[in-house]
Amino acid sequence: MLLYPEGMIKLNDSASEILKRVDGARTVGGIVAELQAHFPEAEGIEEDILAFLEVAVERFWIELR
């Protein structure tokens, strides 16, 4: 579950795994590398992560620096 000023959204497992790592210390590349290592069988994971982060930024769930 993600709470933000405009409401809340129930996240699927993949989105939760990504957002757990968005902590201000890790880079996007670091998040991708960590998830690729954690889920080696997942094909196209980098594209999925980047697409999700793009949506999260557009919806103001996160802010990338």
Image (cartoon, rainbow, N blue to C red):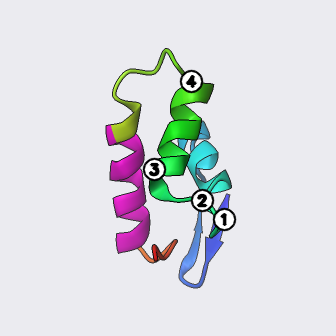
Circles 1, 2 touching at the beta carbon (< 8 Å): yes
Reply above or below: 8 against 50: below
- Mark 2 highlights which residue? 26
Q: CA distance from mark 1 to mark 2?
A: 6 Å
Tag 1: residue type? Asp
The numbered mark, 4 or 3, whose residue comes first in the sequence reads: 3
- Counting from the top left corner in percent of width and height, residue 35 is at 56, 36
Q: Nearer the viewer, residue 4 or 31?
A: 31
Q: CA distance from mark 4 to mark 3?
A: 15 Å
The numbered mark, 4 or 2, whose residue comes first in the sequence reads: 2
- Counting from the top left corner in percent of width and height, residue 62 is at 51, 72
Report whether 50 appears left or right of 32.
left
* Mark 2 nearby-residue class (10 Å; few <14, some 14–19, many ≥20): few
Reply above or below: 64 against 6: above
**Which dot marks residue 29?**
3
Q: Nearer the viewer, residue 7 or 36?
A: 36
**Which dot marks residue 14?**
none
Tag 2: residue type? Arg
Q: Nearer the viewer, residue 61 or 43?
A: 43
Circles 4, 2 touching at the beta carbon (< 8 Å): no
- Mark 1 highlights which residue? 23
* Numbered range of the magenta stretch: 47-58
Is 22 contained in the magenta span?
no
